[in-house]
Image (cartoon, rainbow, N blue to C red):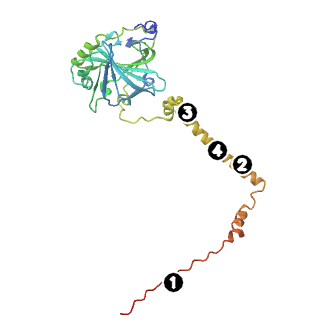
Amino acid sequence: MSNKLCSEGQYQSPIDIKSNSVIQCATKCNLVFYYRTSKCSIVNIGNDIIMEYDTGSYVTYNSVVYELLKISFSIPSSHNIDGYSYPAEMLIFHRSADTGELLVLSVFLDVNDAMSKSNMFFEMFSNSIPTKKGQTSTINTSDDWNIFNAIPETKSFYYYKGSLVRSPCTENVSWIVLDTAVNCSTNFFDKLKGILGNNARKIQKTNGRQVYYNSNTAQANTRNYGDKLRCYTENEFRESCSKLSANPEIISSKNKQALILLLIVLGIIAFVLAILYFHQKGMLNNVGDRVKNFFQAPVLNKIPNIPKPALPTPIIPIRPPV
């Protein structure tokens, strides 16, 4: 990583999280899942594999919507918990459409062959991971293949501000590191390691950063609402749609609507003022009588009577005598 920020940045990731020094944040760290099903598209970029996920899935963190972008892996785990490193880590990248801010959801992977939702999730594409840089593969997945199945049942997590773990090491990235690991099969792990090797970045200094913790046990926070329509309060709706305000087409449409509305209002005001003016000048007195007299004027009554045309006399044929 030759990028200057990677070597000199003060808020870099990953870090070793010390569980005895975290700050409890409870409802101040509110995470809700809205993950949908997807097909599986994977590309090998050399030092990592990137799994693309269909649009429409997202999480909300403190009422901000972060849309799911892609998924990658590190071996061993990027983060440590109290000095302990897991065999692998899955990084689920999200971005806020409003602010562009990134949020990465981190899931630790343990290796064992116990049957589980996460094991089945990884096995769906374990034999289709492209082995060479630049290669891609697409897998038609089952109707219930969902990234939420790779999220642990216990959804307690740590939160801190960090960076991307690869160049350009961009900072101001929100990290949510789930406290509980999920499992993957030995087959999946061996194939992943055979392609990636050890690609995890070394642990970075915290430099006084605060790490927050939420046990996240509320039932509303442990479910997946991906098959539901999201309901917005008025403020959330305005905030989520504010990104559209810079769109030239929308600005033009809004300006046209405002101009039409303004012209209608001005027309109504002008009409009312004209009525008041004519009334003040007495020009509206006996308007009803004038209209009645107009329609009773002689010129309208002198419509000539047009005689009806005479009907021709019918001809009755006479039968000759027999």
Q: In which quarter of the image is the N terminus?
A: top left
- Give how far across and how far down residue 282 sits, in percent: 78, 56
The answer for how far apart the CA atoms under marks 3 and 1 are is: 77 Å
**SS for callout 4:** helix
The answer for how far apart the CA atoms under marks 4 and 1 are is: 67 Å
Q: Which of marks 4 and 3 is nearer the N terminus?
A: 3
- Give how far across and how far down residue 143 sits, in percent: 28, 33
Q: Residues within 10 Å of mark 3 (few under 14, many from 20)?
A: few
- The mark closer to the camera, 3 or 1, is 1
Residue in the image at 31% along x and 29% along y: 39
Residue 231 to residue 87: above or below = below
Kind of residue at disc 4 = Val
Q: How crowded is mark 1: few (under 14 residues within 10 Å), some or many (20 or more)?
A: few
- Give how far across and how far down residue 69 sits, in percent: 38, 24
The answer for how far apart the CA atoms under marks 1 and 2 are is: 67 Å
Q: Earlier in the sequence, mark 1 or mark 2?
A: 2
- Farthest right residue? 281
The answer for how far apart the CA atoms under marks 4 and 3 are is: 21 Å
- The mark closer to the camera, 4 or 3, is 3
| Side of 63 relative to 133 (left or right) | right
Kind of residue at disc 1 = Thr
Q: Which sits in the foreground, 167 or 26?
A: 167
Kind of residue at disc 3 = Ile
Q: Name the residue under label 3.
A: 251
Q: Mark 1 points at which residue?
A: 313
